[in-house]
Amino acid sequence: GGSPLRLGRPCLRRSRPSRHGGSGPPAEPCPKRPYFSSFVARTNTCGELRSAHVGQKVTLYGWIQYQRQGLFLVLRDFQGLTQIIIPQDEARSHVKELLSSAPVESVVRVTGVVSLRPPGQENPKMPTGDIEVKVETAEVLNSCKKLPFEIKDFIKKSEALRMQYRYLDLRSFQLQYNLRLRSQIVMRMREYLCNLHGFVDVETPTLFKRTPGGAKEFLVPSREAGKFYSLPQSPQQFKQLLMVGGLDRYFQVARCYRDEGSRPDRQPEFTQIDIEMSFVDQNGIQRLIEGLLQYSWPEDRSPVTTPFPSMTYEEALADYGTDKPDTRFGMKIVDISDFSQRLGIHFVQNALSYPHGTVKAICIPQGMVSDIFTYSVRFILKSLLTKFLGQEQQSELIQELKMQVDDVVLLAAGEHKRCSALGSLRLESADLLEAAGLVLRDPAVFHFLWVVDFPLFLPKEDNPTELESAHHPFTAPHPSDTSLLYSDPTKVRSQHYDLVLNGSEVGGGSIRIHNAELQRFVLEKVLKEDSEVLSHLLDALEFGAPPHGGIALGLDRLISLIVGAQSIRDVIAFPKSFRGRDLMGNAPDYVTAEELEPYHIQVSWPVAEAEAKKN
Amino acid sequence: GGSPLRLGRPCLRRSRPSRHGGSGPPAEPCPKRPYFSSFVARTNTCGELRSAHVGQKVTLYGWIQYQRQGLFLVLRDFQGLTQIIIPQDEARSHVKELLSSAPVESVVRVTGVVSLRPPGQENPKMPTGDIEVKVETAEVLNSCKKLPFEIKDFIKKSEALRMQYRYLDLRSFQLQYNLRLRSQIVMRMREYLCNLHGFVDVETPTLFKRTPGGAKEFLVPSREAGKFYSLPQSPQQFKQLLMVGGLDRYFQVARCYRDEGSRPDRQPEFTQIDIEMSFVDQNGIQRLIEGLLQYSWPEDRSPVTTPFPSMTYEEALADYGTDKPDTRFGMKIVDISDFSQRLGIHFVQNALSYPHGTVKAICIPQGMVSDIFTYSVRFILKSLLTKFLGQEQQSELIQELKMQVDDVVLLAAGEHKRCSALGSLRLESADLLEAAGLVLRDPAVFHFLWVVDFPLFLPKEDNPTELESAHHPFTAPHPSDTSLLYSDPTKVRSQHYDLVLNGSEVGGGSIRIHNAELQRFVLEKVLKEDSEVLSHLLDALEFGAPPHGGIALGLDRLISLIVGAQSIRDVIAFPKSFRGRDLMGNAPDYVTAEELEPYHIQVSWPVAEAEAKKN
């Protein structure tokens, strides 16, 4: 338990004389609100002033959001907006001159007295809307040249432009909110892990070496010819070694790296909340994570309830056609093979005769009303009911699928085990229904789900007679399936668990193998891998390694779902483009041959580029 | 202010029935102690049990530290040691068998009843020394093979062996203490920055591009031929851009990278507490850092007092011969040029005739008694006093240097501005005095010191007619010296400040240039650098960049000084060797040519190695 995260709404406190050099928040009891004006000359932020401050002399620092005819301006900082009245008297004409000529987005200091706005001019939409500050002195700290775009949230900008001028985009309300909320959620997570549950924050190396199958790991040339570090995809090996080292409870907000080339909504570097515990089982990790999320959950979002529901991998595939089901809406997949068998329709029975032959259906509520399916599809559906089925069979099907008037049913007959086609169809139907105005997946509602009992191994995609780890080779088999490991490894379930939020995978982990012999068997006999590269880990398991398990939460994805961002780029201060480029600083960039020399490497220019360089 | 960090001494609380799956610490008011037994089946850690627990049934998990004749064993976990009494009755012979045959460092579970030790057998040196646990059931979770060394702190191991088996070394009391204290100090720093003072924890990219003069930056090949990311030495540019973006108060526990080849006590990756604030001056940052260190300072170390003393760069060089003086002891350098001038000794006057010619001295208290200087040196000293100086001059010198009987004086005459030779001599003298048994530099005493007013530019080492930044090109000039920038830049002091602890630099920062024109002048006119690579930063300054400044604390060094570690390697979980190698996992390592292909690079083997490969 614990109270959810309170976002830093301004705390009403009397402003005090400038505490330049003051070292602590004010003594008034206001424990959960940070003091934003310590160590600087401002008395208040631009979001703080209320009618209770009237009569006080204040100093604010901020950006000119708006200025009108030399009469007033709106000053903005990270916490809000304050209306500033520009003096009109002759004695302060220089202040008027300064403030009326400064371009918008110039950064200024103003000192003045808080006053009530004239009656009728209050702005109830603005937290500081009851007051205004009558300027006495002002200073333009830095002027702003013409902007490439306006800092207003409603103006649509191309994302490339926003990324090029990221430092301007960061001034927007939404990015300020996203980054501050992210910081606060992570801080609450740290409190929960470190202060409440005794976890140790340990930093693990990011310069390591390639792991087997680490094709997506960035390389870092070293000064030893031919030798490279690699940037790990996760601290997996290190956190297990920390358990062997008796650290007992480890966590880290870990920077991870994955080189996937160009992929939308992936970043070459990303962050995970990385956790490992000794002497724990699957249930322990799940309860820990539920407590963690509940404790750190922002107050201004709809709350999460614990424990989270759990579903096996098999159930998820059967009911939702995916291992990360979005459980905010129904439209589950229904197996109507038995029913279909009895229909006596030739092509249906043919489909059912294959090893994994099934007939499955999803029923889309109000699919007809929302008028979203093409005539051809609708025609097939209608024809199925009316042409192939008798009246009694129609009723039976309607009952089986709990169909109502105007529902649309999609059927798939064929040799499928995972129903991924129907799973995609379910999501696409939801898109179509929402495009037609129905709300199926409220982004303000949070459905967490554990998916468990994954297979330990899967057939390799390029060579299905060989096996690869469904997750990674350190995952422990399900205790009930251990003996199958030696007879039929394909049937072994693992102690892996995924955490799914609204249809997105936001975390995954497992109980690990702590027995060296078992680990060696999995690596060498099942996966046919050279265990030599992992000899340090295998060695470590032989020295009294404790049973252990853990999890990693994808922080960028989690935060983007919490704030309802379109992309993880909106919760990262300086994201890369989907091609992995920093559009602001222009990275990656060319380097000279001399700079490569200490690393004993040279560029192998692709033929076309080499030719172009010649000419 | 704020109370200093309390280290996690065990909290005496009644142990409760196994709360497997429990989600929170117990309800008893014990706010600052984490609950180490949540989410697992143990009831207590091995450091917790006291006489108040007598009669309770407990379950402990830990490693066998010691076992004697099947009678008892000592169980160890991260929190302490507990004596376990092995049952001797026939009914539990299998438990006896299990526990007496398990090798040391095997990991076991024991369940039993807490009992008082028989009178006279208490161990007052052991926090759990009043009790023992009488085992009822036990389980060997993982056996330990023969150890490469014993896990006892008093056994000297070679550091290479310790690093190879780092996971075993981590079980030692000292490394557990160091890593846990580090975690707790950083957590307290976060509380101070984030919860008390409204700083935002922002993660900045580590895949960026080369900065000008970034010869020490690791390169990361990208999939675009010839283009490389680089791993930044600090988030300097990003934190300044965050200020332009209105983040106002930024901090990050930032991973930084520096490729310096082989250097003792440096790591290719290291961590800094990285801080930046808008609208702040030098005084504001200094008070912030003093508050931060005081708030996060461990309770079991001698406290630090604030404000820290401050010294100019010039004073530091003149008095201590270094810009990071160890102020725990005296032996300051004294300029006796005036006195020496009057001596009329030819070689002294010759030295004084040079532009920076001076005669300086340090007086080493009890230098004679401690019998540490070689006869030759002593002879010269004696001869100076007796042969060259008259009685009156001798008295004058003795008074000038406040010499006492048995003190030794070292003199240096010559053309020196920085006194670095005498500075080194001062430290070496301290080494010698301490080797002779005197305590000059108590490692338990903490002397923080600000060093300020550094020069903004220094002559380039390889070409003294050109200038380079003393720190980095973003450092603002001292307000009093701004006009000198255009006339005599060598005379300009900066707004840089270093934080020194016991003679080690543990932090440094500055007020930055926020004016684009000034920044461009410094880059192009003073430093003669191509400002194009920094165009994004120069651009950013033109869009209403606020005045800002910051600091970075070297976390590894700071923690190593706090815990009194010999090397920063002792406060890092998985350090690299001084050659930059991971001796446990064997990184960096060779990769295949195929693995290099996507990055369009190939290895240029040095001639010797290429030859060797051929044969």
Image (tube, coloured by chain):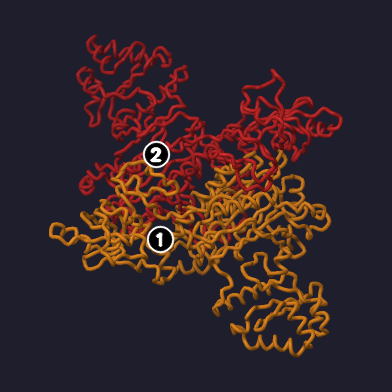
Chain colours: A orange, B red
Q: Which mark is residue A170?
A: 1
How many angstroms separate mark 2 from mark 1 (CA)?
Answer: 29 Å
Give me the chain letter of mark 1: A
The answer, for residue B233, to whether it is visible in the render is no
Where does residue A264 sit, x and y in percent of width and height?
A: 54, 67
Where does residue A584 sit, x and y in percent of width and height?
A: 41, 62
- For the point 53% across and 67% down, the residue is A607
Q: Which mark is residue B129?
A: none
Residue A342 figure quarter: bottom right
Disc 1 is placed on an element classified as loop
- For the point 33% across and 49% down, the residue is A14
- Residue farthest toward the bottom in the current orientation of the protein: A387
As rendered, which of A52 and A268 lies closer to the eye?
Answer: A52
As rendered, which of B516 and B259 lies closer to the eye?
Answer: B516
Give me the chain letter of mark 2: B
Residue tagged by mark 2? Answer: B291
- For the point 38% across and 48% down, the residue is A35
The answer, for residue A158, to whether it is visible in the render is yes
Is A203 situated left or right of A212 in this image?
left
Where does residue A468 sit, x and y in percent of width and height?
A: 72, 59
Callout 2 amino acid: Gly
Labels 2 and 1 in the same subunit: no
Label 2: few (<14), some (14–19) or many (≥20) C-alpha neighbours in 10 Å: many
Residue B447 figure quarter: top left
As rendered, which of A293 and B12 lies closer to the eye?
Answer: B12
